[in-house]
Image (cartoon, rainbow, N blue to C red):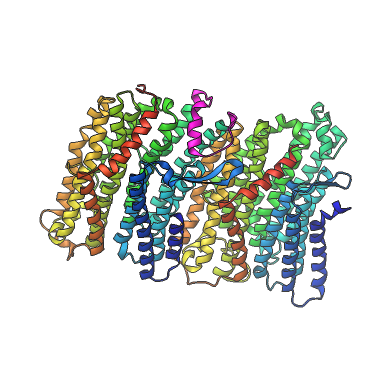
């Protein structure tokens, strides 16, 4: 019974979402719900942290509590927390903010469940629990046609990918008669079945949409650009990471037997994704599109972990650690950067809803003078995304690329490092705009909650960059728990 | 020492007024300078690495440690850094634009450079190595000239790509060390001693060597990887140029001596001629290119490339086959050139900066007869130019003489081929000086006064060092000679070639 208490953070988040939506019916001052959400998320965060490194299996082995899942739970709770903090300003006066927080919490609960799930069906259901609220969130600016477009596009692609994923799951079920990940791993039916390969490819495509790997990335820039910036932060840092978590679980457990089949696909996807993402990001004039493509590129880096794991068993745990850490540093960098985008669009450009030019790179001209603190924080975030020391982003890339060398994939590491060098260009361009272009307008007020949210992320990036030992150990535990 | 710099730079960054900023920057760099001078004397009396070694765990799970130490090679480089940074602060006393950030960036650069020179852990070394780029990127970008955007980003990308290759090399060594059954570590002395025991195919040996070499040569820079340098120099503010040429370029040469040669003596012999050819091309190409430059600052930038070519030549000579005496001679010469060029080039860029500030242009053709209006400055400048030529009695003469003399027994052909650069170097320096400073005064420049006191002061101190160490190089040279003796003696006797 006590094992079930290990799921209490998830229950807490779900319960909180119900409370928020019901309380929203009666409350006049809805802002208080935001504070409530934050307190709840903090509580869930600390409960998870306190129970870190416990293991249990629940619901006839369909849910498994392990450090891997807990690590990502912490990540999702943190992302959600930062997004909520920023939303306190962003949607501070929105009449429907109760629904907003409730949807955010539901999606977070879905994310947490994905990282604990040990069964293809549970993965699919939790995936939907993530997807459905985020479709609505992407279109939360009801009067903004771009937000509507983003939501619709996201919904159609999401429905398509869910269909493909389910189709793939059904093939795996057909081949093995099982949906439990560990049972599939232990049965040797996969190798004997020809439809299992087809199922694997379909599942891979389904996840590739979620992770926005090239060529399944087309929705990401449009959705991230059109969605409200705080929601983009949630999507790029949270939803995308869900794809990583699920892919890690499914491919490294259930489908490990077919690694020679999916190895090549992941290799091609990794190279194509990081190269395409970085090259296209250079040409963007919208900061949100630029960040979206950079997010695509970062997915390519994370995918390196799969390639290394399949290629060399000795380097596998290290590679997975690198993948997990990089997913974390990417999530931190992106959630921070998108919150800054929200801040700039909202406060510097002005106006309640984002105008059509709210995400133009022009707005960053001279930001170092107009909003010095924000510009400094954004600089650190971008440096972390670019992987320049002494930030956390450097450290995680360091571990990830090191694992590629360790796995004997020198050429892959070379491509990744060159890509990383290329990416410096477009990050540095934003920094240049902020510090040495003439500002268009005077100094602006930097709202406390935005700054607090970003400050939290940046503090994490700097502290973890200087002293990564504890989080490295946690990720190593997580990787170890997944690879038996 | 790091702590003082961190605190100092943060304080400077936060200061509001220009007065406070420059005072706190001056104070910080002065304290660090005094500390490094004290270290220098203590080292001379006590000797030995143990005096200043510090070693702590940092990220033990993958073997990252905090390991700093100084020896006969790194201590002079630290000294060079502290002297240059301190004098840069003095020189830039009149900086008006965002002066708090300006002085803070100088201190950041100083911090990172000292970090590079004292780190004995590859991870830490690489962090500092990369961290040097950022403040320099901002210095060029914020206080730079008209094409600063282009120059800043070019600088960043070039050096970042080269760092990427160094990173690959580090990864490969780390990996093979683990494969050999050793505990994972980035500690440089451990890896250096473990390296000969590792079983590597010759492909990997050559690859690791080439990756490091490429990274260091871009930084140095050697022709044809030099194209970022003239742009960065021309657009950078004067202080940025001084730090860039005076200390940043030395990181490449330092890296060659610190890691590459001691670690892979057997592999480095495959590369002797490659390094020598890069050196020779730089030595010959740079003066010819410098001759063509209309801009005095660009001219000086190319002269730097030429001088760095001598270092490549010295490195090649110290690993080529030959007698130990001459190899030590070449190695000490190249190390001393690292120091000497740092001082000389500071005077040159400082002079170019003075001309730019006071005359409003750096195009040589638009100048003329400045010596009449700026007599004190002209004296300092000609001394800098003479030192750059390698005039006997100046610090650069000692360095270049030892390199050429030490290289001749091993690489006679290269030395003979390098000789034509000497008259060309003399010619373009004197020609530029003549057109800019002598002759009738160019009236279109308007009324110009002499350089300001702080500019003169900084230049004068550099000039004093040029002469002092030119006439009595022993304090630094002996230290480097003992370092190079240790280095060469550890290599296989006789070398291969």
Q: Position of residue A457 (x, y in %)?
A: 61, 59
Relative vertical location of residue B317 with respect to residue A430 in this rendering, above or below: above
Q: Is residue B122 magenta?
A: no
Q: Nearer the viewer, residue B173 or A200?
A: B173
Q: Quadrant of residue B308?
A: top left
Residue B223 visible in the displayed image? no
Q: Is residue A247 above or below residue A346?
A: above
Q: Position of residue B299 (x, y in %)?
A: 25, 46
Foreground residue, B366 or B436?
B436
For the point 43% across and 38% down, the residue is B215
Q: What is the residue that sits farthest to the bottom in this orientation?
A: A28
Highlighted magenta segment, given as a residue range: B178-204
Percent across and percent down for residue A43 are: 75, 62
B391 over A373 or under it: above or below? above
Q: Position of residue B207 (x, y in %)?
A: 48, 29
* Image quarter hosting the C terminus of chain B: top left
Q: Is residue A435 visible?
A: yes
- Location of the N terminus of chain B by quadrant is bottom left
Which residue is the extreme one toward the front? B46
* Residue found at the very far left of the displayed protein: B440
The answer to which image quadrant residue A445 occupies is bottom right
> Where A283 sits versus B326, above or below?
below
Is B244 placed left or right of A146 in the picture? left
The image shows a total of numbered marks equal to 0
Viewer-proximal residue among A27 and A324: A324
Q: Residue at x 22, y 60 (%)?
A: B456
- Left or right of B91? Residue B140 is right
In this rendering, position of residue A124 left or right of residue B267: right
């Amino acid at each position: 019974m006590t094992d079930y208490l290990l799921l209490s953070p998830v229950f807490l988040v779900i319960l909180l979402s119900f409370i928020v939506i019901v309380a929203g019916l009666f409350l006049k001052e809805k802002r208080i719900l935001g504070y409530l959400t934050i307190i709840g998320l903090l509580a869930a965060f600390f409960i998870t942290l306190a129970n870190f490194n416990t293991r249990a299996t629940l619901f006839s082995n369909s849910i498994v509590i392990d450090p891997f899942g807990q690590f990502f739970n912490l990540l999702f709770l943190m992302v959600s927390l930062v997004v909520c903090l920023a939303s306190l300003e962003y949607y501070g006066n929105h009449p429907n903010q109760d629904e907003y927080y409730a949807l955010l919490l539901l999606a977070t609960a879905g994310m947490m469940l994905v990282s604990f799930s040990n069964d293809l069906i549970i993965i699919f259901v939790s995936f939907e629990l993530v997807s459905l609220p985020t479709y609505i969130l992407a279109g939360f600016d009801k009067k903004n046609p771009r937000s509507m477009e983003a939501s619709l596009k996201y919904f159609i692609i999401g429905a398509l990918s869910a269909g493909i994923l389910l189709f793939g799951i059904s093939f795996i079920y057909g081949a093995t008669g099982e949906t439990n990940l560990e049972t599939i791993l232990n049965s040797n039916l996969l190798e004997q079945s020809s439809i299992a390969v087809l199922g694997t490819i379909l599942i891979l495509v389904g996840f590739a949409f979620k992770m926005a790997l090239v060529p399944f990335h087309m929705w990401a820039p449009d959705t991230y650009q059109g969605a409200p910036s705080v929601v983009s932060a949630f999507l790029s840092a949270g939803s995308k990471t869900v794809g990583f978590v699920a892919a890690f679980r499914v491919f490294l457990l259930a489908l490990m037997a077919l690694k020679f089949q999916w190895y090549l696909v992941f290799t091609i996807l990794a190279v194509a994704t990081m190269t395409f993402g970085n090259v296209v990001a250079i040409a963007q004039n919208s900061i949100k599109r630029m960040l979206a493509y950079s997010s695509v590129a970062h997915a390519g880096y994370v995918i390196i972990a799969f390639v290394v794991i399949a290629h060399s068993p000795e380097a596998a745990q290290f590679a997975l650690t690198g993948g997990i850490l990089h997913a974390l540093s990417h999530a931190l960098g992106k959630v921070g950067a998108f919150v800054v985008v929200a801040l700039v669009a909202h406060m510097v450009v002005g106006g309640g809803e984002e105008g059509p030019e709210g995400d133009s790179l022009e707005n960053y001209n001279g930001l170092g003078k107009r909003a010095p603190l924000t510009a400094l924080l954004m600089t650190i975030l971008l440096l972390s995304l670019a992987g320049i020391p002494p930030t956390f982003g450097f450290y995680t890339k360091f571990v990830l690329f090191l694992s590629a060398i360790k796995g004997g994939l020198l050429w892959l590491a070379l491509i990744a490092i060159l890509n990383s060098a290329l990416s410096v260009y477009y990050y540095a361009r934003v920094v240049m705009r902020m510090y040495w272009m003439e500002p268009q307008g005077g100094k602006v007020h930097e709202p406390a909650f935005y700054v607090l949210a970003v400050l939290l992320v940046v503090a994490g990036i700097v502290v973890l960059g200087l002293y990564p030992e504890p989080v490295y150990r946690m990720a190593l535990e997580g990787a170890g728990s997944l690879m038996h | 020492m790091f702590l003082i710099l961190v605190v100092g730079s943060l304080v400077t960054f936060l200061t509001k007024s220009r007065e406070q900023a420059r005072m706190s920057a001056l104070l910080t760099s002065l304290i660090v300078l005094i500390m490094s001078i004290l270290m220098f004397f203590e080292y001379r009396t006590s000797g030995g690495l143990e005096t200043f070694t510090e070693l702590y765990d940092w990220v033990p799970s993958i073997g990252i440690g905090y390991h700093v130490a100084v020896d006969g090679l790194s201590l002079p480089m630290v000294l060079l850094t502290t002297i240059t940074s301190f004098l840069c602060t003095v020189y830039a006393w009149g900086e008006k634009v965002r002066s708090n950030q300006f002085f803070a960036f100088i201190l950041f650069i100083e911090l990172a450079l000292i970090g590079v020179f004292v780190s004995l852990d590859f991870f830490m070394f690489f962090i500092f190595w990369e961290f040097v780029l950022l403040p320099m990127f901002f210095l060029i970008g914020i206080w730079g000239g008209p094409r600063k955007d282009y120059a800043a980003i070019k600088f960043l990308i070039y050096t970042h790509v080269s760092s990427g290759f160094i990173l690959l090399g580090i990864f490969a060594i780390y990996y093979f060390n683990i494969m050999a059954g050793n505990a994972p570590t980035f500690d440089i002395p451990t890896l250096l001693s473990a390296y000969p025991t590792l079983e590597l195919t010759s492909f990997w040996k050559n690859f690791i060597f080439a990756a490091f070499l490429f990274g260091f040569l871009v930084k140095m820079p050697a022709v044809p990887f030099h194209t970022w340098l003239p742009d960065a120099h021309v657009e950078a503010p004067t202080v940025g140029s001084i730090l860039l040429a005076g200390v940043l370029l030395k990181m490449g040469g330092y890296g060659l001596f610190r890691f590459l040669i001691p670690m892979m003596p057997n592999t480095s012999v495959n590369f002797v001629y490659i390094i020598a050819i890069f050196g020779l091309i730089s030595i010959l190409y740079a003066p010819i290119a410098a001759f063509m430059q209309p801009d005095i600052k660009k001219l000086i930038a190319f002269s730097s490339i030429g001088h760095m070519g001598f270092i490549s030549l010295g490195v090649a000579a110290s690993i080529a086959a030959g007698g130990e005496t001459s190899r030590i001679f070449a190695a000490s010469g190249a190390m001393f050139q690292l120091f000497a060029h740092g001082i000389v080039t500071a005077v040159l860029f400082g002079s170019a900066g003075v001309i730019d500030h006071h005359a409003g242009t750096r195009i040589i053709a638009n100048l003329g007869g400045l010596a009449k209006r700026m007599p004190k400055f002209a004296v300092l400048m000609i001394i800098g130019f003479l030192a750059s030529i390698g005039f006997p009695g100046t610090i650069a003469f000692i360095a270049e003489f030892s390199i050429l003399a030490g290289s001749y027994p091993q690489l006679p052909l290269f030395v003979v081929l390098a000789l034509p650069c000497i008259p060309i170097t003399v010619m373009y320096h004197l020609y530029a000086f003549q057109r800019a400073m002598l002759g009738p005064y160019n009236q279109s420049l308007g009324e110009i006064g002499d350089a300001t006191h702080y500019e003169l002061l900084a230049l004068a101190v550099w000039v004093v060092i040029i002469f002092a160490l030119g006439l009595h190089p022993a304090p630094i040279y002996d230290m480097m000679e003992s370092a190079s003796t240790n280095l060469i003696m550890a290599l296989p006797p006789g070398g291969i070639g």
